[in-house]
Amino acid sequence: MNFTNAPVYIKVKDHSVSGESFELLLDEELQLLKTNPQPSPENLDRYYESEDYISHTDGKRSFFEKLYHTVKQKALHDKTKLLASFKTTKGKLLDIGAGTGDFLVMAKAKGWDVTGIEPSEKAKTIAISKGVTFAEDLSKIEDNSFDAITMWHVLEHVPDVEQQIVELKRILKPDGVLVVAVPNFKSYDAKHYGSNWAAYDVPRHLWHFSKTAIKTLFGAKEMKVVKIAPMLFDSFYVSLLSEKYKNGKMNFVKGFLTGLRSNIKATRNFEYSSHIYIIKNR
């Protein structure tokens, strides 16, 4: 990573909590964006203090939240099916950023021995009530411990991405599989909404990835991307939220049409709103 004298790619606002503005700096070689300034670790928690941070709650207060959780159930089935296609023998699964635990609950029902890591005490409490067990710290996990590791929209929140990859490689078994899902700032919906694109989500998202960035960062640690899959629902969810940021209210028709257009365009250039990367040791 090289952000010395890096150009400003775009200026964006924290729409959901603080209202503060941030720059996104571009590493041109990696095609990676960095949120600037990045909050200090002791101040980062306050940017998550919102009832609107859906992944940390099981709330169904509004039509939008009800829709989110309905789509989430379909996505959970798809995630477990995708994992099983690359790891047919069920073993030990670690989900980093487990949220309220629904993915691990489903994976456990499918035969996995599951463990989670989650920094939010509120989300963790909900997950524990569902029977999910947690590891406290990634650094305390023994080498070659897990057959599969998943990070669903988590890597963009990690302060030190390169050290995180080192740890992931260390705790993954030599024949294990790593699944990483992140937003893609090269997508049509990102370009369409610009500074109002909800998936920038500054400053909670410290990094903003492209396919080049993921392949290069993991490749530098002797890990290889073996497959890239789209997250088709993300374009709709992100576009609906982006409409709210842009116009002050959700326009479901415009949001849906933009999400659909993004997916259609991505069939040609494979730049979906979010990608799932299947990664293995070399």
Image (tube, rainbow, N blue to C red):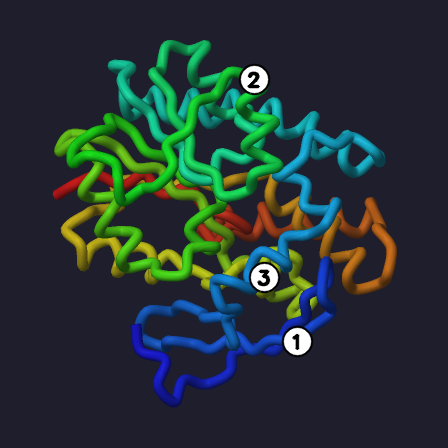
- Identify the residue shown where x is 40% and y is 84%: 6
- Circle 1 is placed at which residue position? 21
Q: Quadrant of residue 220?
A: bottom left
Give the camera-side residue of 14 and 83: 14
Residue 147 falls left or right of residue 182: left
Q: Quadrant of residue 216?
A: bottom left
Report the Cα–Cα distance between label 3 and label 2: 31 Å
Above or below, comparing residue 153 to residue 217 in the picture: above
Q: How many marks are shown on the rendered structure?
A: 3
Decide which of tag 2 and tag 1 comes sooner along the chain.
1
- Circle 3 is placed at which residue position? 200
Q: Which mark is residue 127?
A: none
Q: Position of residue 222 (x, y in %)?
A: 14, 51
Decide which of tag 3 and tag 2 comes sooner along the chain.
2
Mark toward the viewer: 2 or 1: 2
- Circle 2 is placed at which residue position? 130
- Identify the residue shown where x is 48% and y is 55%: 157
